[in-house]
Image (spheres, coloured by chain):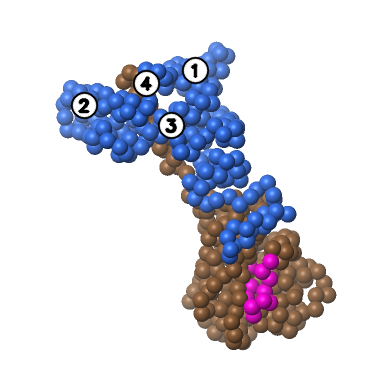
Amino acid sequence: MDDRELEQLLRMAREAEELADSAIPPASITFVRPLWWRPRVWAGLSTLAAAAAVTVVWTLTPRTVAPPPVPTRDPIAAAPRSPATATPDEPESQPIRLVKGTNPGGPEQSVVFAIFRDPAGGCSCVQLENADWGSRRLADVGRDELLAAALDNPCTTLARQVLVVGVSGKPGTVPTTHDDAERLATRLSSVPLNEHQDVSLAAYAAMPDLPIGSTVVAEAVSFFRR
Amino acid sequence: MTVVRVSPSVAMLALEPHLPRPPHALSDLTAAAARGDRAAFESLHVRFEPGLRRMFLSRTAGRQDQADDLAQRTWMECWRSVSAGRYDPARAAFSTFVYAVGTNVWREHLRSRARAAAGTSTIQPEEAQGSTGPGGVAELAELLDDLRRGLAGAGRGLSDEDRAVLRAIGAGESDRGMAQRFGVAPSTMNTKKRAALERLRQWLASRGHRMGERQSPGDE
């Protein structure tokens, strides 16, 4: 091999280096927007409103289940499709009240579901992870922490959107099985993840068997690749 | 429904059985792809596609249709090679392998263009010479990967100055430009360059790359 050929090899090595350097980092996830956050003041919830005012990124909305609703309708159909049809301001339509770390005492078990949707809107995979928040409760966990727990080891890197649902309650009462995860994903499959959709309500409605004292939080995030 | 247990605390339900959980790290993805894991391969495709397309855009003078076609052919060939077990992650980085396949696809493209007697200004005759088979692509990838490691400082035989000179050559710097950068006379720079290339030749030979027994880059 003469010098000219070696020089050509060096140029190729440099191009190969550039190709290696151009690789998109894994799980380059950026929060496009909180999908369901709407700045409204909920009656009787001044404490949380104040917290939300100083923490813009905080969009986690923990909900404690009131007396378990009797699912007379399809759970997904019961979920509000837009603020116009049902909002948390309508307690008669959604027997949910917003709380902040006020679950009754006793140990708490938490699980986090991550439902990954592909660009076509289909469900790519569902991940279920037991979460340990230490001495805190799910209601005290921040949005970023919840998402980090759900997305730490994603089952796909090709998802366009992810719906993260955290559920906590007394040990043994929260959904923890594969069937539970599959059921939740199926029930939420028709929920559009758009700006006006309150995914927490939909997630809550998708789990009608949760006992009193359970907490449900949900967050939808969109991915785009740089 | 395929149920895969990922860890004692993590369970994953793959709703699409043909897409098992892809790993996260590049090395894991590469290893999984080499085992024929399509999801892992697709993840690698997502990561390297923009760079590969950019490379072809540069080579085709901005022809997006050609760049897309060449990139797609490259990925198809990559998948064929990977699924046939012709890619060994221990021998070359995946990016280098993709580059080698892309280079082969580019040369085939140039040859077909030359055969059609429709030469363009972007075709360089020496580039269009020959194309290598699957084994040759793997060999080229291994050679380039060794070269990259050598330029990055791996092993002995190349001094820091040698590597700097060789990197400048790879970047396409002129002799005059290199002389200015290294602060020496052009004649001295030329001497340094020849010496660095000779040591590179010896270093590659010590790594098992027998230059006289293999095809030259232009002939691959």
Report the chain holding disc 1.
Answer: B
Report the chain holding disc 2.
Answer: B
Report the chain holding disc 4.
Answer: B
Between discs 4 and 1, the one toward the N terminus: 1
Asked if both marks, 1 and 3, belong to the same chain, the answer given is yes
Q: Which structural element holds mark 3?
A: helix
Q: What stretch is highlighted in magenta?
A: A165-177
Q: Do the residues labelled 4 and 1 touch (CB within 8 Å)?
A: no
Picture disc at residue B192: 2
Q: Which of marks 4 and 1 is in front?
A: 4
Q: Is residue B4 above or below residue B198?
A: below
Picture disc at residue B211: 4
- Disc 2 crowd rating (10 Å Cα; few below 14, some 14-19, many 20+) is some
x, y percentage for residue A77? Answer: 78, 68
Where, by quadrant of the figure, is residue B142 drawn?
Answer: top left
Q: In this view, does B61 lie above or below A55?
A: above
Which sits in the foreground, A142 or A56?
A142
> What residue would you read off at disc 3?
B142
Helix, strand or loop: magenta stretch? loop
Q: Which residue type carries mark 1?
A: Gly
Q: Which residue type carries mark 3?
A: Glu
Q: In this view, does B32 lie above or below B166?
A: below
Between discs 4 and 3, the one toward the N terminus: 3
Q: Residue at horizontal 83%, vertical 75%?
A: A72
> What residue would you read off at disc 1?
B130
Q: Residue at horizontal 58%, vertical 63%?
A: B8
Which sits in the foreground, B210 or B40?
B210
Between discs 1 and 3, the one toward the N terminus: 1
- Disc 1 crowd rating (10 Å Cα; few below 14, some 14-19, many 20+) is some
